[in-house]
């Protein structure tokens, strides 16, 4: 049994299929998402991978908690993640000038990005169809075709990225 572990994309994602039967397990960015990590259980008959989320909040001192904009460390990390994304999307605000549209688009992108980066983008076909009928998605398709292509790549995930079992 062969498996590849990587982390460079900073997103929790397991890919296994068409072009390669060897699973590639990419771990999420511990410092910028919900502090995900993987546990591998290996026996003579089975390989098992399970993603978990560490909760730093319990280990912070009261002083450290007071320095955060929120007491929940995962909320803090989600806010930091979205802030970083918004900084990188400054071009969007030039392409879409209506404030309500900007808000709808960025919230939609934030949700899909966050879910992909923590490995929760294995949407059902029904969920994918609903997301594609969302007003924000339609605005993106109309005004930001390159971003639509990126979001479509996130919606192309077709397997669980938190858990993998392989029997030998």
Image (spheres, grey):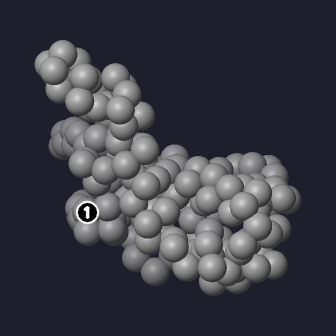
Rendered position, 18 above or below 40: below
Residue at 37%, 28% (x, y): give it. Answer: 70
Helix, strand or loop status at disc 1: loop
Relative side of 25 to 132, left or right: left
Residue at 81%, 56% (x, y): give it. Answer: 134
Rendered position, 102 above or below 119: below
Q: In terms of image quadrants, where is residue 20?
A: bottom left
Foreground residue among 146 and 21: 146
What x and y, as percent, mark residue 115?
52, 50
Rendered position, 26 above or below 48: below
Residue at 35%, 42% (x, y): give it. Answer: 77
Relative side of 160 to 56, left or right: right
Whether residue 104 is visible: yes
Foreground residue among 44 and 161: 161
Q: Name the residue under label 1.
A: 7
Q: In terms of image quadrants, where is residue 157?
A: bottom right
Q: How many labels does the image show?
A: 1
Foreground residue among 95 and 158: 95
What x and y, as percent, mark residue 121?
56, 52
Rendered position, 69 above or below 35: above
Q: In terms of image quadrants, where is residue 131?
A: bottom right
Whether residue 74 is visible: no
What x and y, as percent, mark residue 102?
69, 63
Relative side of 26 to 88, left or right: left
Residue at 76%, 57% (x, y): give it. Answer: 100
């Amino acid at each position: 049994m062969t498996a590849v572990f990587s982390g460079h994309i900073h997103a929790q994602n397991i890919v296994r299929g068409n072009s390669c039967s060897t699973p590639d397990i990419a771990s999420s960015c511990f410092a910028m998402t919900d502090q995900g990590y993987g546990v591998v259980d290996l026996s003579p008959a089975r390989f098992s991978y399970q993603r978990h989320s560490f909760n730093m909040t319990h280990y912070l001192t009261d002083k450290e908690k007071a320095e955060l904009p929120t007491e929940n460390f995962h909320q803090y990390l989600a806010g930091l993640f979205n802030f970083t994304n918004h900084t990188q999307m400054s071009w969007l605000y030039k392409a879409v000038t209506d404030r309500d549209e900007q808000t709808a688009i960025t919230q939609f992108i934030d949700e899909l990005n966050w879910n992909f980066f923590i490995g929760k983008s294995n949407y059902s076909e029904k969920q994918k169809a609903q997301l594609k009928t969302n007003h924000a998605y339609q605005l993106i398709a109309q005004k930001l075709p390159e971003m639509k292509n990126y979001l479509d790549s996130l919606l192309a995930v077709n397997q669980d990225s938190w858990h993998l079992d392989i029997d030998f």
